[in-house]
Amino acid sequence: MLIDMHHHLIYGLDDGAQTFEETQKMLRAAHQQGVTHIITTPHGTPGREPFRLMEYLDRIEETKAWIRQEGLDIRIYPGCEIFYTEDTVRMLNEARIPTLAGTHYVLCEFGVEAPYEYLAGAARKLGVAGYHVIFAHVERYRCLRKFRNLLELHEDYEVLMQVNARTFLEPDGFMTRHWLRKAMDRELIDLAASDAHGVRSRNCRLGDCRKLMSREYGRDTADLLCEDLPRRILGKKNKI
Ligand SMILES: [Fe+2]
């Protein structure tokens, strides 16, 4: 089982797949990487841009029908990569933007220069509202390069930290490589996901990532980040 919980598969909603044909190619590519479950996560910016929920859910059904027709062994679930704004909690409560796979987990992103206090405030507000928070591609945020900040969010706010597969495979420079190694050694990274946007430059390489992680950090760690923790997110609710 290989679960990709961050993937821009559904077409025509963001900068991920643009056509249904591209959605199909992305599914085949994910399948070749050994991915068995995908939570699709188009971008949403609550209160700033309308999130076309009905269109999204229709396209998920269209995609599921295609998967069945092709006999592809892959399951997909709705989700959203939420660019955190002050309207996020309200819109989640009103079910106008989706959580991950119908659970209480939410995937949030921020501007790369957002201050630590803003990230901590988001984690606190979402936590108080009853959501389990996952921060997307934490390697990008300048304030989380400080381990004290990463640790506090992880331990005190119980934020789960997701890193992109590509960062494991091709860290952009020595500093990122060093930071990632240290964060992994301190067990501050919880999830790896593809954040795939297409089949060319930002493609799904989660299977490759799992193999590399297995070599560099051990099989148990690779299983934990690519299967066990994502499975906990999908949970009993989705019966996987
Ligand atoms: Fe993303």
Image (spheres, rainbow, N blue to C red):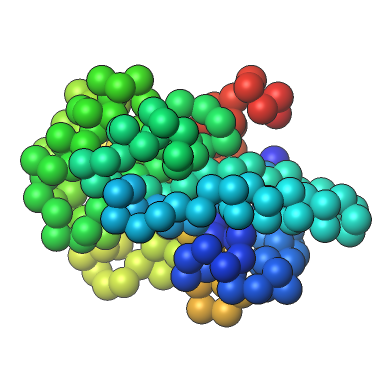
Q: Is residue 219 visible?
A: no
Q: Is residue 164 left or right of residue 196?
A: left
* Quadrant where the image shows the C terminus: top right
Outermost residue toward the bottom in this view: 200
Q: Is residue 11 or residue 53 the one in the foreground?
A: 53
Q: Is residue 5 left or right of residue 91?
A: right
Residue shown at the point (15%, 35%) measured from the top left: 121
Coordinates of residue 58 in the picture (x, y in percent): 68, 51
Coordinates of residue 98 in the picture (x, y in percent): 49, 39
Q: Is residue 240 left or right of residue 9?
A: right
On screen, 148 above or below 67?
A: above
Residue shown at the point (87%, 50%) measured from the top left: 68
Number of disc labels: 0
Residue shown at the point (29%, 55%) measured from the top left: 48
Residue shown at the point (59%, 48%) measured from the top left: 54
On screen, 65 above or below 154?
A: below
Coordinates of residue 107 in the picture (x, y in percent): 40, 42
Q: Is residue 223 or residue 190 the one in the foreground?
A: 190
Q: Is residue 85 or residue 50 the one in the foreground?
A: 50
Residue 101 occupies quadrant: top right
On screen, 156 above or below 184?
A: above
Q: Is residue 174 visible?
A: yes
Coordinates of residue 43 in the picture (x, y in percent): 43, 57
* Quadrant where the image shows the N terminus: top right
Q: Is residue 159 left or right of residue 65?
A: left
